[in-house]
Amino acid sequence: MLFTTLQCEEGCKDGDICECASGNECYLGCEDGGCDQYCHNMQRCGGVCEDGCSFRCHSMNECSAACGDRCDMQCSSVNSCAARCDESCRYRCSDADRCGVEVGPGSEVRCDNVSSCEVECNGPCRVTCIGTGRCDVRCAGGEQRVSCVEGFACGTC
Amino acid sequence: MALAKLAGLLAGLVTLSALSGTAHAQSTIKNPGDRFPYSVELEPHVVLGPFDPPGPGPGADGGYGLGLRASFELVRDGFIHKLNDSVALGVGLDVLEYDGDARGQCEEFEPGLNGTRICTEVSGSGNSVYYLLPVVMQWNFWLSPRWSVFGEPGLLLRHAHGDLGVSPFVLYAGGRLHFSDSVALTLRIGYPTFSLGVSFLF
């Protein structure tokens, strides 16, 4: 702890696990996509990646993820969770004060035990809200959202 | 690559140990002041960064570079009056290039939904050059005419990614193999760097 406030186990390249922990602020990049990014026990952290990445963060104030297609992201026990991704993403936000997520077509978002969850879908998507105070789902182009069991969808449930 | 260089450095240490020869027979550690008088030590060196670089930055594939340390003798008879010790102020500059591309600082935030913000660009991809400026207290122990050792607690100023930062605690330990009164081979290990250089005592 005296020596460094940040830890990163490996460089972040395709297939590697890259981790930020136990510091104030750290942001993770990824060379070509396909990275496994992990942030925890910090003040602020985030990941920027291309396609096919996974991203997890927990136990912090602010966490964000920006990703391309086919990303799998989780944010838990965080005050503010934010994410933006393209097609076929999965995002789970749990035990958070607020979540703001923009996803592309074919994506799934789940908010569990969140005070306020706001989602914008740029194409067909599915949003599940459980134990969530405010679940606001907007669809691209002014399309009306549809109500589903435990949530909403753009397109069909 | 850095690990290979580190292995070479350690091999150098072993070689130095083998060269110690009759050092034990010529011990000066209990003779305060029994050494070549000097006021400044200049030590150019090669430097390795086997650890994560201090502060936010890229991942730790290792760093390497060049540096210079200048140590100014402040106290000729050090903290232990019965020993041949001395205290100097050491300042240095090490320039290292670290391989790696993982961590960095957020270069650009964009507003997200629900009052959030999203980092969309991270610095630190590719290799990064670090400028490290240690400021240390060098506590020397003059063991024999051939050998001296030292410890160096202090702090470190660093410049990387366009930012200046401070690491409040760094620690080094090292030894010198004296070829003559004024020239020595100096090995230093510690955090965040290791170094091997030649000391010139003036």
Image: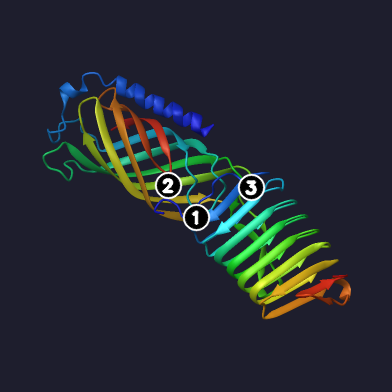
In the rendered image, the vertical position of residue B86 relative to residue A88, given as above or below: above
- Observer able to see residue A26: no
Q: CA distance from mark 2 to mark 3?
A: 23 Å
Residue B184: % across, % down? 31, 27
Residue type at the position of mark 3: Ser
Using the rendered image, report if marks 2 and 1 lie on a common chain.
yes
Dot 2 corresponds to which residue?
B133
3 and 1 marks in contact (CB < 8 Å): no
Q: CA distance from mark 2 to mark 1?
A: 11 Å
Secondary structure of residue under mark 2: strand
Q: N-terminal of the two: label 2 or label 1? A: 2
**Label 1 neighbour load within 10 Å: few <14, some 14-19, many 20+:** few
Q: Quadrant of residue A80?
A: bottom right
Q: Is residue A5 toward the left or the right of residue B36 in the image?
A: right
In the rendered image, the vertical position of residue A126 relative to residue B65, given as above or below: below
The residue positioned 36% from the left and 35% from the top of the image is B188
Marked residue chain, label 3: B
Residue A57: % across, % down? 60, 61
Residue A45: % across, % down? 58, 61
The residue positioned 18% from the left and 41% from the top of the image is B76
Q: Quadrant of the C terminus of chain A?
A: bottom right
The residue positioned 71% from the left and 63% from the top of the image is A91
**Label 2 neighbour load within 10 Å: few <14, some 14-19, many 20+:** many
B75, A18: nearer the viewer: A18
- Kindly identify which numbered label has been placed on residue B125: 3
Marked residue chain, label 1: B
In the rendered image, the vertical position of residue B144 relative to residue B153, given as above or below: above
Dot 1 corresponds to which residue?
B164
Q: Is residue B135 toward the left or the right of residue A105 in the image?
A: left
